[in-house]
Amino acid sequence: MHVSFINLLTALGALASLANAYHNDYTFAARDNLDELTTSTRSLDHIRKSPDA
């Protein structure tokens, strides 16, 4: 099978782009989950410290 150098570079570039997009989505989701967890923890702390509770 004959694969030209240009085709190989194009395929590698597409793969790198896909991996980068996946990494960015994963990082964003992880940050979003961490932010949500932090917000939930703050809410719980506020409830615990509230004199009405």
Image (tube, grey):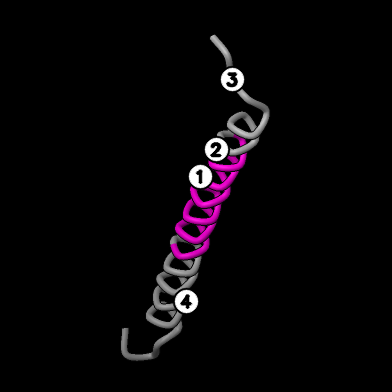
Q: In the rendered view, would you say 37 is above or below 19?
A: below
Q: Nearer the viewer, mark 2 or mark 4?
A: 2
Mark 2 or mark 4: name the one nearer the start of the chain: 2
Mark 4 or mark 1: name the one nearer the start of the chain: 1
Mark 2 or mark 3: name the one nearer the start of the chain: 3
Mark 2 — residue?
A: 15
Mark 1 — residue?
A: 18
Magenta residues, dominant SS class = helix
Residue shown at the point (61%, 42%) measured from the top left: 13
**Rendered image: mark on residue 3:** 3
Residue shown at the point (54%, 42%) measured from the top left: 14
> Label 3 amino acid?
Val
Q: How far apart are the alpha carbons under marks 1 and 2? A: 5 Å
> Label 1 amino acid?
Leu
Mark 4 — residue?
A: 42
In percent of width and height, residue 25 lies at 47, 55
